[in-house]
Amino acid sequence: MDGVPIPKDFLLPLPASAGDLELALVLLFLAHILFVNLMVGGVLLSLAFEIRGLRRPSYDALAKKIAATVTVNKSLAVVLGVGPLLVINALYGLYFYTANSLTGGAWILIVPVVISAFLLLYLHKYSWAALADRKGLHLAIGGAGATLLLFVPLIFLANINLMLFPGRWLEVEGFLSTLALPNVLPRFVHFVLASVAVAALFLAGWLCRRGFDFETALPGLDRSVIKRELLTVVLAATALQLLAGPLVLATLPPHGLSWLLLGNLAVAVSLGIAALVLLWRESSAAGPLSARYWTVVVLLGCTVGLMGLTRHLYREKAITPHRELVAAHTADFRAAALGAEMRLAAGTPRIGAGEVVASPGERVFRATCMACHDLDTRRVGPPLREIVDIYADNPDGLIAWVKAPGKKREGYQQMPPITMQDAQYRAVATYILNEVFSLPEATAETG
């Protein structure tokens, strides 16, 4: 990973195990994205039917009824968005905050953009009757709200995409340059198609179900016709998703792909194709919805669940190599910092004037170990006599401990790992175990 920035991580304890958090992230994200899809798709379909209502007023009533669903879905989308946002901060804080910083102003704009979009959509909903004779203005209000609303997931997608590719961090110069990354716009198109499909599927179930007095609620419209139109929208949007999917996959860097991911993807696509076949049959059948509709819902629900899992599998594999580099860099930094603290706590070692260092092991000991270890007296670490008692005739054990120390004694700071050349490890182990106590006391004194 030459040229890739490798920052130090900010090590904070996770509130739960990584596995539990990963499961929570997938489930919470799926719950959140469901209502985001219903919200975005509902807004777009409401505007589409309102435009159609310019020629057939009965469709204007359908558009108004669809707009009424957006309010609830907006609230649930926002509330359910808190969970995955908190979990992604815990699991991927370094990557998430870096992406947010690199996109700068666009990320800060999310809150005012969301507020503005919601206010415009409320105005669009509640001014329906007041602006009945000024449809151009009414559609402009709804269109402005929809445009702002679409800008929010675009920012999120740009950030989530950027956090996966540390190799691109040095190339990015704000939000617009992030949009130029290969995978952002294909994913955004895929998201919009998913929103339209999910919203149309929900509306077909809500408006065309058995027991709903369709003719009273929407006079001038035929239940079978609306069912066919809505399911045709689902069919077309889902089919376009299947066509757009390979483009999304092709624009992802291949290092995040795996056979498990591709297997999940293959199963998801198979279920999606089966759902398309049933959708075609259901859209062609007259009357209210049949049991096929619920089979389609289950199949597409499984498809979405597998896609959510696939997205997580890619994210984990894509950032694993960089995570390992960051972990190593962080460990080196912490070891150096702890070593400095330990040497500071031990004070400056006293070395006699004119003293001659007798061996390479003693030179390494005085430069690296002497600040924390004395002959018979506890300093930051235990005295050498205890170390000799433990590792007598076992230099390999002592070397292994110095390379990757743990914590054995209460009341002592944990020793940082010491990085040296192999010959230096061997020399200092030989000095401690075989030489230090055979030297004259004046020479061996370390305090």
Image (spheres, grey):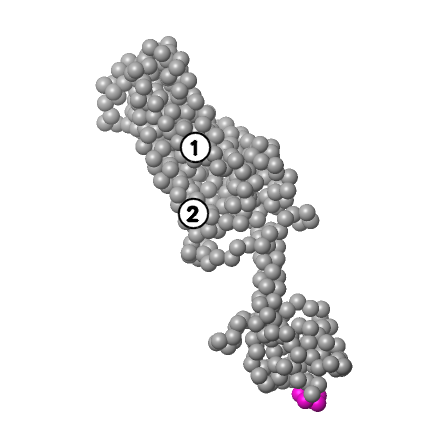
Residue occupying the point 43% across, 44% down: 85
Left or right? Give the position of 329 relative to 240: right
The amino acid pointed to by label 2 is Leu
Tag 1's secondary structure?
Answer: helix
Tell me if residue 85 comes above or below residue 251 in the rendering.
below
Tell me if residue 302 comes above or below residue 241 in the rendering.
below
Q: Are marks 2 and 1 in contact (CB under 8 Å)?
A: no
Question: Residue 330 at what x, y percent from top left?
Answer: 58, 58
Q: Nearer the viewer, residue 63 or 344?
A: 344
The amino acid pointed to by label 1 is Pro
The magenta span reads: 437-441
Which comes before the other along the chain, label 2 or label 1? 2
Left or right? Give the position of 299 relative to 368: left
Question: Residue 415 at what x, y percent from top left?
Answer: 57, 71
Tell me if residue 317 comes above or below residue 376 in the rendering.
above
The residue indicated by pointer 1 is: 112
Residue occupying the point 28% across, 13% down: 220
Q: Nearer the viewer, residue 386 or 74?
A: 386
Residue occupying the point 32% across, 13% down: 132
Q: Looking at the figure, which quarter contains the C terminus?
A: bottom right
